Amino acid sequence: MYKEDTIAAISTPHGTGGVGIIRISGDKAFEIAEKIFKGNRDFKLIRSHTINYGKIVNPENGAVLDEVLLSKMEKPKTFTREDVVEINCHGGMVVLKNILELCIKQGARLAEPGEFTKRAFLNGRIDLSQAEAVIDLINSKTNESSKAAINQLEGKLSQKIKDARRKLIELLAHIEVTVDYPEHDIEEITGQMIYKEIGEIKQKLCDIIKGFEKGRIIREGIDAVIIGKPNVGKSSLLNELSGKSKAIVTDIPGTTRDIIEEYININGIPLRIIDTAGIRETEDVVEKIGVERTHKAINDADLIIMMIDAKRGMDEEDNKILTMLGDKKLIILINKTDIVDEDQICKIESLLAGKKYIKTSMKEGTGINELESTITELFVQGEVNINEEVLLTNIRHKNLIDMAVSSIEKAMDAIENFMTLDLVSIDITDAADYLGQITGESVSEDVMHEIFSRFCLGK
């Protein structure tokens, strides 16, 4: 069934735009396009990988749906390794919907989320980790996360995983020959030889794992929450970091009643920064809901940025907030330093002994650069610049490599305990299987469905 049906979907985002794209892939892609596309020449005479002007016409009544540019691409030199047609039409939702419905009437099926990429994987154009990089590239929020996705899409991580798996399989083959055909004139593989080989493979896998935390942060970013009492400058900080007046800034305590969030780029790290309602006891029903949401945001956050009003100083409410945070990663900002003297600031500093704090003034814009540098240092311990570095960014991949390393360690323990090679090979087989699940060489249909269900329609 998979080989026979042809799929179609809108590949551009929903909404109105200058151009919209409908993609068709499968054995009937050209047949469908020939029925609905009217250009200057017969569709069969159009050369592959060219763009052609014409109109989309309903063959039943001759009604023109739109003027379009059509791309014809013959297999196997396409994204899916199937015949592919892409129709570039005007970007109105009605036009796109009508053309898609026409394609379906002529024999296509509406594609499932990620099905084009899934076909690219099933047809051997890319492996599973490269397929996952496609969605990472689409969702990337900084240049560095985009670079990490491109490196994975180009197969740099896959190559390292495949090399390790190939060596494990070669060792298994040697073990099998030694165990099953001892009478043959073949170089015998010993436990010590296997121990050395799998030890080297384990080290290479551990080196890949080392970069996971940095890769995860580059891919997923950091959830940061700005907290503090009302009117300490939380909304001003959000505006200063994001470069836009998204939050309302007034001198009235309790102005922010709900969660306000913004994605910003801090030295290559995607930062989802949340401005919360000020934490205080209040009888205002709406503000009380905002405070409750603030507590939930704190529990989910990777980083807390707590602001203290330098003019008012620290009081019991500030201490309660600090106690509530527990062992969360914390940066304290002593704000409004432009309107107080040094003695007042020193009093606050003495109460913050042992905690990381920065003196700031949102009015004058001071302390922002130091805050950005501190956030970077706190999470990646250095410059975020991957260049040609291959980073592990996907938790699924990390868990599978961890399991492969664990299986290799079991095999090494078995050798140290003088167990037979056929028993040692069980753990090596498990390690190879875990690595194969990363690239898709040994993966279940359920796992594939879970991965591709996260894709958007049309990709």
Image: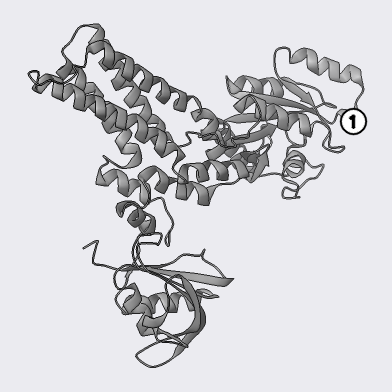
Q: Position of residue 281 (x, y in %)?
A: 66, 32
Q: Amino acid at mark 1?
A: Asp
Residue found at the very far top of the displayed protein:
417
Residue found at the very far front of the displayed protein:
185
Q: Position of residue 242 (x, y in %)?
A: 72, 45
**Would you name the residue on which mark 1 appears?**
338
User: Would residue 384 be seen by someone viewing this image from the given angle?
Assistant: yes
Relative depth, front residue between 9 and 43:
43
Residue name at image x 35 percent, y 60 percent? 81
Where, by quadrant of the figure, is residue 263 drawn? top right
Relative depth, front residue between 289 and 275:
275
Above or below, 184 relative to 26: above
Residue name at image x 42 percent, y 24 percent? 204
Report the side of 133 relative to 241 (left or right).
left
Residue name at image x 49 percent, y 46 percent? 136
Label 1 neighbour load within 10 Å: few <14, some 14-19, many 20+: some
Query: Could you tell me which secondary element the residue under label 1 belongs to?
Result: helix
Relative depth, front residue between 84 and 374:
84
Report the side of 177 relative to 306 (left or right).
left
Q: Position of residue 324 (x, y in %)?
A: 60, 23
